[in-house]
Image (cartoon, rainbow, N blue to C red):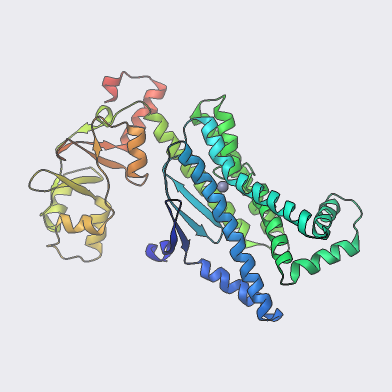
């Protein structure tokens, strides 16, 4: 599937200063719910869709809980996206101080706890409390107590009949599960972040992350196993487990990078170089130039000397394989590829790397007018950091 289709999303609006998006595949979920409930008639279809939207409203409020807690600590949120498997609030970074991460991680489920509390209070005050006794009865049955069959039956009728009471009851159950599910210690889910932050209060941050991500992987495996061995097998938890496992490993790697550069500036780890490609060079010349250069990416500079982007060898190979015109210039090539930020010599690397994103491995370092000074090559730098961990070097040798 092309990447643009995978990423396509609809903006729902901007609330509390944060843009809220919904992923296109959400339409499939609505269609699925509508089709699978169509036998009950239009009222049941409308009720099912209202429940689905209600669930995602609660998920959205959960994500805003994280975002608002992060804002309290001075950390912004890029955006919030609703996916069929849940919501994602993209914080600019996670707080590095463990107790702050603990607060940000708990703020999401705390919103659902508040919703549960409000619904329970409402049901207590405005209904005959059948639902509350029914839910307690269901929990009791789950724990092995003899069930009160008429009570359970009346619960099922309430849940399946389109009504405000049915809607509110479903929201109560959903929010209860949102709290329970998010607190599973599967890093980087909320419970995993709580676990990491508690570990990081005692251990080295990198070690805490490594342990949390491994425990997270085990949780993801168990989740996938349980989902696959249920009858019939349920694909959604498998998908979520896969997502958790992947995201956990990716974040642990990112922490490994940022921790290994903690306290260093771009200027201290860069390799001084003037190797670059003029912006007006055609593909033909670029190809020749790269035959004598081993770098996986080179900065592209204008005639003024200013760096305008980074050209990757893989982009050049793709352009050649795609039969692109030999007169295409370096400037045009980087315009089609992904562009990157630049670093300043005095910038703290751990902050700078968050800005440039983890997919950029070679980042140009520029002076105050944007001219090239050198390159920070993450791959070679990490290899050197790994060596220095086993045989400590002085900073001089490191840079
Ligand atoms: Zn959360």
Instruction: Decide if residue 252 is on the left or right side of residue 141.
Output: left
Using the image, determine if residue 206 lies above or below residue 84: above
Using the image, determine if residue 341 lies above or below residue 56: above
Q: Residue at x 32, y 27 (%)?
A: 264
Q: Residue 265, percent across and down? A: 29, 29
Instruction: Decide if residue 317 is on the left or right side of residue 154.
Output: left
Using the image, determine if residue 297 lies above or below residue 316: above
Of 72 and 294, nearer the camera is: 72
Q: Residue 222, percent across and down? A: 66, 48
Is residue 159 visible in the rendered image? The answer is: yes
Instruction: Decide if residue 289 is on the left or right side of residue 385.
Output: left
Q: Residue at x 83, y 60 (%)?
A: 128
Residue at the left extreme? Answer: 303
The picture quadrant where one finds residue 134 is bottom right
Q: Residue 94, percent across and down? A: 47, 38
In which quadrant will I find the C terminus?
top left
Of 166 and 186, nearer the camera is: 166
Q: Residue 253, percent across and down? A: 45, 39
Of 216 and 82, nearer the camera is: 82
Q: Residue at x 68, y 62 (%)?
A: 233
Using the image, determine if residue 86 lies above or below residue 10: above
In which quadrant will I find the N terminus?
bottom left
């Amino acid at each position: 599937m092309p990447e643009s289709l995978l990423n396509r999303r609809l903006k729902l609006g901007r609330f509390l200063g944060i843009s809220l998006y919904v992923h296109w595949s959400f339409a499939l979920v609505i269609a699925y719910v509508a089709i699978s409930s169509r036998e009950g008639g239009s009222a049941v279809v409308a009720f099912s869709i209202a429940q689905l939207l209600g669930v995602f409203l609660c998920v959205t409020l959960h994500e805003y809980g994280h975002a608002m807690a992060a804002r309290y600590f001075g950390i912004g949120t890029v955006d919030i996206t609703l996916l069929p498997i849940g919501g994602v609030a993209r914080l600019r970074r996670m707080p590095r101080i463990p107790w702050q991460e603990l607060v940000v991680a708990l703020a999401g489920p705390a919103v659902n706890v508040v919703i549960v509390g409000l619904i329970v209070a409402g049901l207590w005050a405005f209904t005959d409390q059948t639902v509350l006794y029914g839910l307690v009865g269901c929990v009791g049955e789950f724990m092995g107590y003899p069930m009160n069959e008429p009570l359970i039956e009346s619960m099922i009728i309430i849940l399946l009949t389109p009504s405000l009471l049915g809607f509110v009851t479903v929201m109560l159950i959903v929010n209860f599960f949102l709290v329970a599910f998010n607190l599973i210690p599967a890093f980087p889910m909320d419970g995993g972040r709580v676990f990491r932050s508690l570990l990081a209060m005692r251990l080295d941050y990198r070690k805490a992350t490594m342990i949390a991500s491994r425990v997270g992987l085990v949780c993801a495996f168990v989740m996938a196993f349980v989902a696959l061995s249920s009858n019939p097998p349920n694909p959604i938890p498998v998908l979520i487990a896969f997502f958790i496992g992947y995201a956990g490993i990716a974040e642990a790697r990112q922490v490994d990078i940022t921790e290994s550069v903690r306290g260093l500036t771009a200027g201290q780890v860069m390799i001084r170089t003037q190797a670059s490609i003029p912006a007006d060079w055609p593909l033909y010349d670029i190809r020749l130039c790269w035959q004598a250069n081993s770098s996986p990416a080179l900065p592209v500079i204008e005639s003024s000397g200013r760096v305008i982007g980074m050209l990757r060898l893989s982009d050049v190979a793709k352009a050649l394989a795609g039969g692109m015109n030999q007169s295409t210039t370096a400037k045009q090539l980087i315009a089609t590829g992904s562009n990157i930020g630049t670093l300043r010599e005095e910038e703290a690397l751990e902050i700078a790397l968050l800005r440039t994103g983890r997919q950029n491995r070679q980042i140009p370092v520029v002076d105050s007018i944007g001219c090239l000074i050198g390159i920070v090559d993450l791959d070679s730098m990490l290899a050197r950091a790994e060596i220095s961990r086993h045989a400590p070097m002085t900073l001089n040798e490191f840079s």
